[in-house]
Amino acid sequence: MTDRYASFVQSAAGRALVKRLGLPDPPRLRRHHPGDPLLAGPALLGAATGGRLAEPITKILTAAGVELADPTGATPQRYGALLFDATGITDSTELRQLYDFFHPQARAVLPSGRVIVLGTPPQECPTPREATAQRALEGLVRSIGKEFGRGSTAQLVYVTRTGGDTADGPTLSADTATSLESTLRFLLSGRSAYVSGQVIRVGGGAASAPADWNRPLDGQVVLVTGAARGIGAALAKVLARDGAQVVALDIPAAGDALAAVANDIGGTAVQLDLTAPDAPARLAEHLASRHGRVDVVVHNAGITRDKTLGRMDADRWDQVIDVNLSSQERINDVLLERELIPAGGRVISVSSIAGIAGNRGQTNYATSKAGVIGLVDSLAPALRERGISVNAVAPGFIETRLTARIPLVVREAGRRMNSLAQGGLPVDVAETIGWLAWPASGAVSGNVVRVCGQSLLGA
Ligand code: NAD
């Protein structure tokens, strides 16, 4: 589905009209193309006194080919990214260092630029004062996401300080360092075009760096449910591009479209209704006999059956809960029981901002999608011991057939009510799931990452 308004705004006549009337001005977002540099310009790195991450971040950025700007450089520059290591901040009075770093650069960020603040998870802080100051970072980041504009995004990354302790004090463990690298590579690149205002926790879990960061999923067997169209089809494409062997699953009625997706990417197709009583066993047998395992399970299939609660028949309720939530649980149970998801494996579910904010006419859908978040919260700690990470993405307004069915006025409101003033594309959700699936992202677990352009809903 195309956003005609956004295309018009990007024309010369559109630009003039938007300026004169003060209309929403959706910028053209920088999206990833293989071989692209991570950033459109140099990165400026700042750090609070006593921070612990400047060194590993410098190493990661240098390895990724990012040009680091000289903070003392006399000529004013424009930056592809501003990064600030705030882990040294231990008291609210020290938050001033954020102002001192960001204030002079607020207008120096290039279009589709990136702002990343790194902190320590408040629950790991030794004093209430430090925990308070670290929690405060969220307000800064979310506000920058709303202020800087022109397609720029802002995120807070909390990096654990446990796991790599030495006699000299806490250092990053190798796993955390690898997942910090995968996370920075994702957030800085065009892959995260529609992700903004997010808080991501890195730490706790095993991670391995790829031989080639352009093929971060090389050799991984990935199951994608609901792969015949929409977000699932984009997912199959992105994961295959990044090196995965994709097993694409959808209902038999979508068999032709599913076969087209699978053929296009050299993957395999499985026609299966996930709600069938024997679906988990049949799927497990297919994966065991064809591949012997499944490294990444992406639960993407989902349906809506909207009605206000008073008018909703029980069938609509049951179908939505069963497809969107219960079938995921049944499949996880069987794949885990049969040990088909090995150490280093990933379970990634697709939730929705409706599961965070609720939505009129979607009690069934929002319940199922909030349940998906519950699934992440409850499974992640248990599966960490088996070396398996569990995360969810929560898309906002994404341009698919699902959203094309929304009445025009509501659809237009949904599109514009976010910091980027436009709907996301299926590829934006796919790239985010891709990053969570990388072997290098194993120390990112228990997160729910919204792909919503920092939607005002459920903020
Ligand atoms: P879509 O309707 O285009 O695709 C969903 C796919 O799931 C279809 O191919 C369908 O055949 C398949 N499917 C449905 N029931 C199934 C079953 N029982 N067994 C096997 N396959 C089944 O939807 P989409 O927009 O691509 O959404 C994908 C996911 O993203 C869903 O979980 C949806 O809830 C979620 N989501 C979408 C948006 C959005 O704006 N499009 C927003 C938030 C969340």
Image (spheres, rainbow, N blue to C red):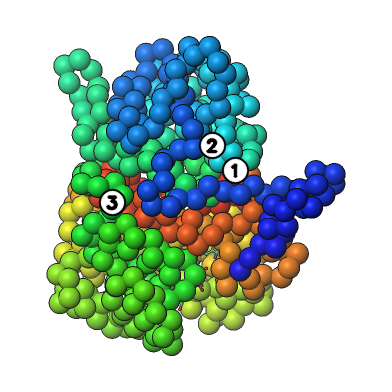
Is 127 placed above or below 344 here?
A: above
* Residue 113 tag number: 2
Tag 1: Cα neighbours inside 10 Å, few (<14), some, or many (≥20)?
Answer: many
- Residue at image point 45% right, 28% down: 43
Image coords of residue 455 (percent x, y): 61, 49
Q: Is label 3 in a helix, a strand or a loop?
A: loop
Residue 124 showing in the rendered view: no
- Residue at image point 85% right, 44% down: 20
| Amino acid marked by disc 1 | Gly
Indicate left or right for 242 with 410 as reference: left
Indicate left or right for 243 with 107 as reference: left
Mark 2 and mark 1 in contact? Answer it, CB < 8 Å: yes
Comes first in the chain, label 3 or label 2: 2
Tag 3: Cα neighbours inside 10 Å, few (<14), some, or many (≥20)?
Answer: many
* Residue 151 tag number: 1
| Amino acid marked by disc 2 | Gly
Foreground pick, 105 / 179: 105
Comes first in the chain, label 3 or label 1: 1
Picture quadrant of residue 241: bottom left
